[in-house]
Image (cartoon, helix red, strand yellow):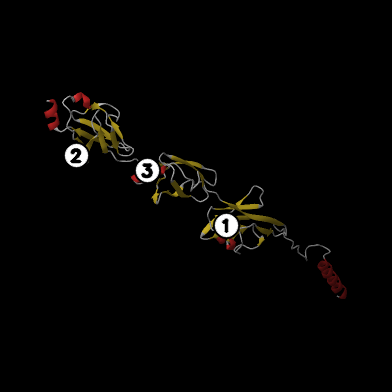
Amino acid sequence: MKTIQFVKTVMIGMLCAGMFSPTSCTKDETVQKSSEKELSNFRIAAGGEIFTGVVQPNGTTIQFVSPYGFDQEYLKTATPSFDLSKGATASPVSGKSQDFTKDVVYTVTAEDGSTAVYTVHKVDGTTSDAYFLEFSIYVVGDTYQGTIDDENSIIYFSPALNKWDDLEEDAVPTFTLAPGATASPESGVVQNFQQDVVYIVTAQDGTVREWTVKRTNRTGNAIDYFYLKPEGYDRIVGKIDAATHTVTIEYPVFGEDFTPAALTMYPEVIQISLGATVSPDWNVDCDFSQDVTYTVTAENGDQQEWTIIVPERYVQRKWK
């Protein structure tokens, strides 16, 4: 009995010592750790806006665009958010505010301890806006606001009639442009606005747009003065009636040798509205022994017929 007990004791010891199986009494607990350390979906919250970072081809630079005109103060305390590979950590951490007006460096550490460095870089945005926000012209004590036609790239202005002559040398434009844009000629440079003036506006990104400043077409189509001067006689001043569009010629007492043919002439003076034209032209002979009709065309195309009236009593007394 004692011998048997000894053998049992020895056998149990050998089994626990691992003589029959080296792994039966221990376990390998080693696990392969990940080397993944990707930083993705980078976003920045600033001033009520969300800016998305884009990983550049080098794989380590993340760029975001700050739009032109955006208040950079908001970026100084902006809040980032991003995703990481499973098990990875980042320094600084997601959600911690940073000053993104300058480069911010993030170090991402994988589970296995390897690291990757990412640099977040701000790119200042540009604008293609090449337009006028406001345009005015100062002319000898008066300022005239321009009407901006953005669709056709035209600016219209309407100076008073008594300022037309001053537009050639005494008109000073003042204007403001879209942010970042420049213009040639520049604001404040005197121009001759009796004619169209062309401005070249260049946006910040180089976009070029041509604008034309026009004074509005005048609407006047009146005859303001009308004088005849028969040879050997004093000037005859026509009496203007703007309501009926007539000019009455009050002939003086002519000599006995005066004939209707002597009234075939062109007016000594015919003054019409600024910018208008007249037909027949002022230097074309007409027979003023009878009524003559002139057509006055305003600069904007409006027309009005004016009749030069010969009082019947002169015609009856002298030539009938």
Name the residue: 44% across, 43% down. 169
Q: Position of residue 129 (x, y in %)?
A: 49, 47
Residue 141, percent from left and from top: 40, 51
Tag shown at residue 164? 3
Q: Nearer the viewer, residue 295 or 22?
A: 295
Query: Which three-letter amino acid code belongs to the residue tagged 3?
Result: Trp
Instruction: Measure the alpha-carbon separation of dots 2 and 3.
Output: 27 Å
Q: Is residue 198 above or below residue 178?
A: above
Secondary structure of the residue carrying numbered label 3: helix
Task: Tell me which amino acid carries mark 2.
Answer: Thr
Q: Earlier in the sequence, mark 2 or mark 3?
A: 3
Q: CA distance from mark 3 to mark 1?
A: 58 Å
First in sequence: mark 1 vs mark 2: 1
Q: Residue at x 57, y 57 (%)?
A: 43
Q: Nearer the viewer, mark 3 or mark 1?
A: 3
The residue carrying mark 2 is 244
Between disc 3 and disc 1, whose residue precedes? 1
Q: Nearer the viewer, residue 113 or 158?
A: 158
- Residue 294 location, quadrant: top left
Place of residue 35 in the rendered image (x, y in percent of width and height, measured from the top left) = 70, 56
Q: Is residue 186 visible?
A: yes
Q: What residue occupies the far bottom of the structure in this picture?
A: 2
Query: Is any atom of residue 158 visible in this view?
Result: no
Disc 1 vs disc 2: Cβ atoms closer than 8 Å?
Answer: no
User: Mark 2 falls on what kind of element?
Assistant: loop
Residue type at mark 1 is: Arg
For the N terminus, the quadrant is bottom right
Are the two marked residues, 2 and 3, in contact with CB atoms closer than 8 angstroms? no
| Disc 1 target residue | 43
Which residue is more in the foreground, 212 or 297? 297
Q: In what element is the residue under mark 1?
A: strand
